[in-house]
Amino acid sequence: MKAEELARRVRAGERVALARAITLVESRRADHERRAGELLQAVLPATGSAMRVGISGPPGAGKSTLIDQLGVNLIGAGHRPAVLAVDPSSTRSGGSILGDKTRMARLAAEPAAFIRPTPSAGRLGGVAARSREAILLCEAAGHDIVIVETVGAGQSEAEVADMVDTFLFLAQPGAGDELQGLKRGALELADIIAVTKADGDTAGAADRSAAELTAALQLLQPGAAGWRPPVLTVSALTNRGLDALWAAVLRHAAAMGEAGAFAERRAEQRVRWMHQLIEDKLRELLLAAPGMGRRLAELEGEVRKGSLSPRLAADRALAREPVEITHGA
Ligand SMILES: Nc1nc2c(ncn2[C@@H]2O[C@H](COP(=O)(O)OP(=O)(O)OP(=O)(O)O)[C@@H](O)[C@H]2O)c(=O)[nH]1
Ligand SMILES: [Mg+2]
């Protein structure tokens, strides 16, 4: 299908077209990449209008369960949420993290919702490189809220924070030590923090964790527009606190909008994204150079043995042999 035709169908809200479009932008085949570029350019005028919300947190924190319930709530309020699940491990599980494995079974059955796992392990340019483009496609398809779920581990978290307007961190009810581990990376990225599983046996622990996190946050500088991340407790199981959570997302968006920080954040994200793509392309071009595989293997061998400095090896890989300077030539 021509890129223009696909763009038209995406914009008409055809789910199959949206799924195909995302597959196209994820592809690394040269002809696919060209068509993906045309497609993205064609849908560009129809993008940008959704609220982009990132949801992160440690494995098992309850991200998917929460998104399922939140999504159902949002549909009840007339929204059309799309969910992109960036799962660094999904190639291992065969890319099948839908249905009960994603714990978004109810949302998956809703015609107004769109759920898409992004198998992204092993990609150059980071775990979430193409999720940004998937966000744009979801917007073009008329989804007014795009939620990106990612496991709070390593690189993907920062990448997702850099593609959304509001970044939500979900913490497990737990002991102080576990919470200490979260502080630096995640808390600095978070616009809103919610402690999950505030129900049944874990209700008390959730309250205590929320108090600890609130104390920890006092030590951080406020973010853009003087925003201080609120700490909430939620239960996806009982739906408790989810309305308050969404209200906090709206408050954050409004505060950023008023301060002009919203548009600035998106503009900065686009520019960083462009640079990221340039870096990816450069690396790809380098690796595609004739004989590069062998050359790199040789250089690696010497660097491993310690007979060549990494700096000189890098110069040689880039064919920037240090040149002897001859005077008067
Ligand atoms: N009590 C209680 N359990 C919950 C709640 N939300 C999730 N769980 C349980 O926590 C476990 C993990 O939930 P998930 O939603 O899969 O967590 P996740 O953060 O998406 O996990 P990964 O995607 O594997 O990182 C499941 O056994 C859920 O049933 C909640 O609000 N209350
Ligand atoms: Mg999950």
Image (cartoon, rainbow, N blue to C red):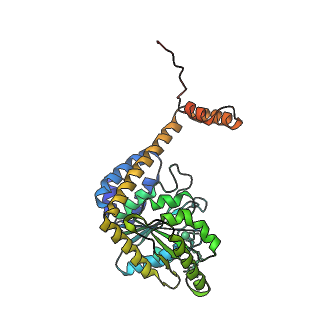
Q: 162 or 128: which is nearer to us?
A: 162
Compared with residue 262, is residue 71 higher up or lower down, i.e. above or below? below
Compared with residue 202, is residue 166 higher up or lower down, i.e. above or below? above
**How many labels, in total?**
0
Q: Position of residue 8 (x, y in %)?
A: 30, 59
Residue at the front extreme? 219
Horizontal side of residue 8 vs 303, given as left or right: left
Q: Position of residue 179 (x, y in %)?
A: 60, 71
Horizontal side of residue 307 vs 261, given as left or right: right
Horizontal side of residue 195 vs 78, given as left or right: right
Q: Position of residue 67 (x, y in %)?
A: 48, 74
Compared with residue 124, is residue 116 higher up or lower down, i.e. above or below? below
Which residue is drawn at the image coordinates 60% and 68% (left, top)?
Answer: 180
Compared with residue 290, is residue 122 higher up or lower down, i.e. above or below? below
Residue at the top extreme? 328
Q: 132 or 90: which is nearer to us?
A: 132
Q: Quadrant of ligand 1?
A: bottom right
Q: 150 or 114: which is nearer to us?
A: 150
Which residue is drawn at the image coordinates 51% and 85% (left, top)?
Answer: 238
Residue at the right extreme? 305
Q: In this rendering, does residue 80 appear at all?
A: no
**Residue 89 figure quarter:** bottom right
Which residue is drawn at the image coordinates 31% and 56% (left, top)?
Answer: 44
Residue at the left extreme? 45
Which residue is drawn at the image coordinates 41% and 56% (left, top)?
Answer: 133
Horizontal side of residue 151 vs 260, given as left or right: right
Q: In this rendering, does residue 73 appear at all?
A: yes
Q: Position of residue 185 (x, y in %)?
A: 54, 62
